Image (spheres, rainbow, N blue to C red):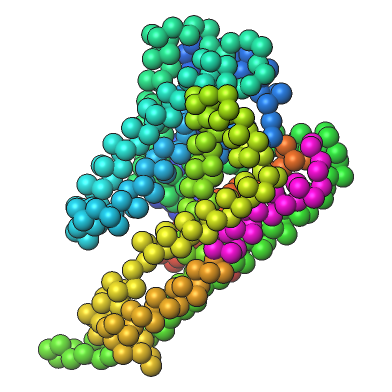
Amino acid sequence: MLTVLTRVFRVPDLRGKVLFTLGVIVLFRLGQLMPAPGVDIVVVRQCLGSASGGVFDMVQLLSGGAMLQLSVFALGVMPYITASIVMQLLAVVIPRLEALRKEGQNGQAKITQYTRYATVGLAVLNAGTIVTLARTGRLLPGCPQPLLRDDGLLAVTVIVLTMVAGACAVMWLGELITERGVGNGMSLLIFTQVVAVFPAYLSKIFVLSPMSFVVMIVSGLFLVAAVVFVEQAQRRIPVSYAKQLIGKRTYGGRNTYIPMKVNQAGIVPVIFTSSLLYLPTLVAPLLGAEARAWVELNLTSGTHPLYMGTYVLLIAGFAYFYVSITFNPEEVADGIRRYGGFVPGIRPGRPTAAYLGYVLSRLTAPGALYLAVLALLPLVAFAILRDPGTQQNFPFGGTSILIMVGVGLDTVKQIEAQLQQRNYEGFLK
């Protein structure tokens, strides 16, 4: 590890990018720990100690412990990620967005601007809902004292505006990391959110049961190794380019491949499914006692069969849908044909597109099954063990493992690529 850091910090440009990224991450965590104005942080921390399990642990995990604490960066990166996914889905049904996506850099800049507007709208909706729940005492059920020092209209408006401004600042920080730092900014920030709560979760497990702590660590290491193996797995479609004589020079005549990963959808289906399953819990208190009771019975506990079935079906469905909109076999086949390439044994054009679609469907099936099993594995373990202490503090869920492994591998590959560009061997070998 020391050799890796030496190689990274030996290059001035790369050293500056890494330090800049670390500085933005520290600033991001400070914003997540800073309470919004008008929030009684002492009461919030006292009530958080008694609110655990089910949706509370999921929210704490995905927000880095910031949402239920009503901090400045309480919304984190979830509004931006949700807006990005929604824009990708809308590009399938709205011709204007589809045309912008094909225009190249200028079209992508406009889509990014639309995503920012959608992020602000979602941030206003999320912040308003969270503050309303805190104002009515339903954000942390069972809390005997009010979470807000003043529940007047002006005070509530200030808190909502602070959280929305925090979401916009997080969006800006993520874009800064992407432009001037190392790796994808939003991915690194959500990685930070997940990793930030791990020490607290592990310490709770160790206090409750040291033996469960050891078993969980060993199981988590095996799970991480399995996730790394599957995330690296890919099907390579060979592509050959014929030689072309242009002027006095010969171009082409090389062989390459199209890498198609087993988990082509990445972590998006799991994150989007977790967000959708949290929405009923977030909205149910505003609909009435009967709806709240039904949601708490069926969609809050991870051990309920309805919750498990809905979780698996949504993940599998979003995996297929997301892969279908992010990888277009016809566009890939047309690009191969345009540059004089072909898949050996397959005719260019429609036959190549049909072949790519067939391979993609065959890969998406085990990929969706892998995501569903990985997300369902902790829930099944909870149902079998029925250990309340472990169940409420289990950090090695499918969402957290996928985020850590996926973002970690991607960041390492980008750092290695920059090292190799500067005549270094890299550090993965």
Residue under the point 47% across and 56% down: 318
Residue 39 versus residue 220 in the image, above or below: above
Is residue 69 shown to the viewer in this render? no
Residue under the point 72% across and 56% down: 221
Q: Is residue 272 magenta?
A: no
Residue under the point 42% across and 59% down: 322
Q: Is residue 370 magenta?
A: yes
Is residue 133 shown to the viewer in this render? yes
Residue 103 versus residue 128 in the image, above or below: below
Q: Quadrant of the N terminus?
A: bottom right
Secondary structure mainly formed by the magenta segment: helix
Magenta stretch: give its range.
368-389
Residue under the point 47% across and 53% down: 268
- Whole-percent x, y for residue 206 in the image: 81, 38
- Whole-percent x, y for residue 405 in the image: 58, 55
Q: Viewed as shown, does residue 223 lie left or right of 345?
A: right
Furthest residue toward left: 247
Q: Nearer the viewer, residue 384 or 170?
A: 384
